[in-house]
Image (cartoon, rainbow, N blue to C red):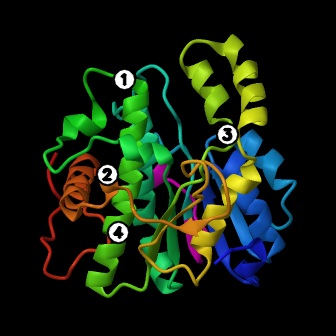
Amino acid sequence: MSWHERDLGDWTGRTVVITGANSGIGLAAATVLARHGAHVQLACRDPRRAADAARRIPGSTTAALDLSDLDSVAAFQAPDRIDALVCNAGVMGGVYLPSPQGHERQMATNHLGHALLVKQLWSQLEESRGRVVVVSSIAARGGRLTAASTVQDLVDPQPYEGQRVYANTKQANLLYAQELHRRAVAAGSPVSAVVVHPGVSNTALFSRQQVDSGHPRLAPLAKAVGTIAFSSARAGARPTLRGLDAMTPSGAFVGPRLLGQARGRPHLLAVYASGRDPAVGRRLWELTEQVLGTRLPPVHHDAAVNPPQR
């Protein structure tokens, strides 16, 4: 069935945390949610840009969050009540750059930081019977993580190919959300998990990629091409908004399906083969716990109490 933003209904009294919400898809989703009555917290790396965005969204607040830095995630100032967390922020491609902890920056930002953030906010999400929406990408189809992947594949992939690593991070988003859903169901947790992809949208990712690759003069061209060739950020935000809709079941994968899933209204999709295997999902979960040095929720009562060692 066709889905429309009005199907979200009334969100008055509910709080949504959106990472990377100062621009693009995150900003578009935050704007729509605020119109439906939600209080939205913009969790962003750049406080100035977050404040500029918040001035355009009535009732919103901001909080500093650099997902590439695990110390920043640990220090994140979250609201007391959280009804939904949208793991939206991301970086794409470029040259190899390490995070403050020495992890490859794309994986640190797109997956590891978000996994730790979910842990940080888990008690609020359980209390509100909340939802986690993870923003993946059609690039997840090209991810090469397997049940034999290693810690090095996550934090120091060699040889380094920026676009391949990006595909792996988006595959990790898909695998993580699916595994989070399975574990929440098995543990009897009230938290639900949905993964979405926006198609090909005109966001800052493409121009930022040129800057990170050492070609800042190409950034305006990338922005101009995106305006012409790609769908709008608002269109790209619709899968996220449908993912937040209570009528969308936990474990669902939402995205457009026209033009090779590049455009169109959000639909419930079949999970890509790269994100479908529970064995790969379990392996990613284990590797993520090893890198972070902590158990990730939900944890079964019979699980070992000691966190895995690096």
Of the numbered discs 1 and 2, the one sitting upstream in the chain is 1
| Residue 73 located within the stretch drawn in magenta | yes
Of the numbered discs 3 and 2, the one sitting upstream in the chain is 3
The residue under label 2 is which amino acid type? Ser
Residue denoted by label 3: 46
Magenta residues? 71-85
Q: Quadrant of residue 246?
A: bottom right
Q: Is residue 135 left or right of residue 297?
A: right
Residue at the (61%, 42%) spot, across then down = 45
Residue at the (49%, 77%) spot, across then down = 125
The residue under label 1 is which amino acid type? Glu
Question: Residue 164, image x and y in percent?
Answer: 37, 31
The residue under label 3 is which amino acid type? Asp
Residue denoted by label 4: 180
Disc 1/disc 2 C-alpha distance (Å): 19 Å
Disc 1/disc 3 C-alpha distance (Å): 27 Å
Question: Residue 309, image x and y in percent?
Answer: 14, 51
Q: Which mark is residue 53?
A: none
The answer, for residue 120, to whether it is visible in the render is: yes
Question: Residue 274, image x and y in percent?
Answer: 31, 51
Q: Quadrant of the N terminus?
A: bottom right
Of the numbered discs 4 and 2, the one sitting upstream in the chain is 4
Q: Nearer the viewer, residue 295 or 282?
A: 282
Q: Nearer the viewer, mark 3 or mark 4?
A: 4
